[in-house]
Amino acid sequence: MRKFRVLPLVLAVSLAGQAQAADLMSIARDALVNNADLAASRSGYNSVQAGEDIERGDLLPQVSATGSVTRYNITSSQRSNLAGAGAGGGAGGINAGGGSDNHYTGSTVQVQATQALFDATNWYQLEASKRQTAQEALNLRVDRQQLLYNVAQAYFEVLRAKEQLDTLRAEEQAVSRQLEQVRQQFDVGIVAATDVYEAQASYDLTRSQRISQESTLQVNFEALEQLTGKQYSSIDGLADDMPIERPTPASQQAWVEMASSQNLDLLAARAAVKVARANLDTSRAGHLPTLSAFANYQYGDSDQDNLRGNNEQNQIGLEATIPIYTGGSTSAQVRQSTFSLEQTQYQQESQLRTAVQQVRSYYAQTLNNVLSVQAQKRSIESNRSALEATRNGYEVGTRNIVDVLQAQQNLFTAISNYADARYDYVLNLLSLRQEAGILDVDTLDVLNGWLRADKAVLLNFESQGTTGLGIGDDQPDPGMNGPSPLEGSQGGAGQRRLPPPNRTALPDDNDLNGLGRGGLGRGMPGDTGY
């Protein structure tokens, strides 16, 4: 049977090292189970909780037993002189001398029991330990909540990086077509060399940004692995119609009151004040007497020649200890504990102010994100119209290639800003709930409902094509290989003739597909809260 029991474990270990698809909730569950920092916090809590049992033990009966067996080897030598008056006035004396050896074994057994009847120091130490356990429990909740936020932040940073990469790839393709067209126009003498260099510079800049963004996406994927200890081949993307609305309740004061009563860091700071107050009581108890009861039983046995047999002894009584003078150490401990209490009280006040300031800040930022998403959506449309107008001006000669490239860059920047605004909204809303002390698994579950598997972000570089994560730089590089655009414009066999006037290359619908989450022609998403 053991052979078959090993097989599931082997399969589990082998599958754990393989990349897997996941959504926000599955990654959060993995983090709660596997995150090393959270595991360390749990162990710290268990350690503090064990200290409570240690302090309680000092108030319970203390029983001990001791025993000994001793072998005695005694050698003694004695000499005695006796003097007296003899008959006939004579003197006489008797000298006696002798020696003896004594070898025997003795054994003793002692049992002692004590019970504290009054010991304020131990009692307050137990109370302080209980409060330390409560404080550590809050610290564990703080770490757990922070882990949930870190998972969500890492998750949405991956999605943000993917949208930015898609935008840069589309922009690179559009600028590449623009550069190719300008080169063709230069070859036939329609435009000056300056236009070619401007287009080439714009392409090189976009290309370098795309390469950097590919690295950013890979690094963000690895951040998820750091939190969970697992690799993920893909994660679900954010739905186009995810609602953006004001946080609920729609009152800053309501969020402030929530943070003042539920912020976990603030609750931990208040628990620290209780611990410091218990420590102060412990220090003051050093001035008080202690009273304990004790009972002893002792048994002894010996096989010595003249002392064969055993003896027993019983004792029972009370013992009181009154501290009279301890060199000033007890008073110094009281002063030290008093200052420690003041420190924790100031830290509590600081934490309260921080929580209030943070919740106000995140509430204002969330409201700003709601308006920003709407403004960035309109900015995409306006920049698209501006690009169309600039293109028409370029065709009739009132605008130059720099204007076209700038307008094109503005459009893609607007698309990128729109994506940033959406993810800023999500993360700021999560931060707001964290400061209010209500960020939990249920919050992530609501967000998870707006994720879609058909918008998954893949870590498989080869399978995503031009819109995926490609670490390899296999994109066409117009103008980077072969002769300079100017060197290839001197005429010769195969040179292209002057083409009819073409419209300046614009990003087509394929370039913008999937960008801005919902495309450029869709209306604003509705609004909902968490």
Image (cartoon, helix red, strand yellow):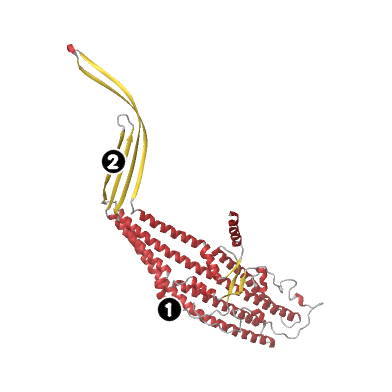
Count residues near mark 2 (Cα–Cα under 10 Å), then give few for <14, some for 14-19, many for 20+: few
**What kind of element bears circle 2?**
strand
Residue 284, by quadrant, is bottom left
Residue 125, quarter of picture:
bottom left
The residue type indicated by label 2 comes to Gln
412 w.r.t. 154: above or below: below
Whether residue 348 is visible to the viewer of this picture, yes or no, is yes
* Label drawn at residue 252: 1
Question: Which image quadrant for residue 202?
Answer: bottom right
Q: Which residue is mark 2?
A: 313
The residue type indicated by label 1 comes to Gln
Residue found 38% across the figure and 57% down from its top: 52
Disc ID at residue 401: none
Question: Depth check: 515 or 241 in front?
Answer: 241
Q: CA distance from mark 2 to mark 1?
A: 77 Å
Question: Which residue corresponds to the image point at 46% horizontal and 73% vertical from the top-left?
Answer: 433
Which x, y percent locates residue 176?
69, 77
Q: Position of residue 431 (x, y in %)?
A: 48, 72
Q: Earlier in the sequence, mark 2 or mark 1?
A: 1
Answer left or right for 176 relative to 286.
right
Q: Residue at x 61, y 63 (%)?
A: 18
Residue 190 percent across, percent down from the top left: 73, 83
Q: Residue furthest left?
A: 89
The percent position of residue 328, horizontal first and vertical second, equals 29, 53
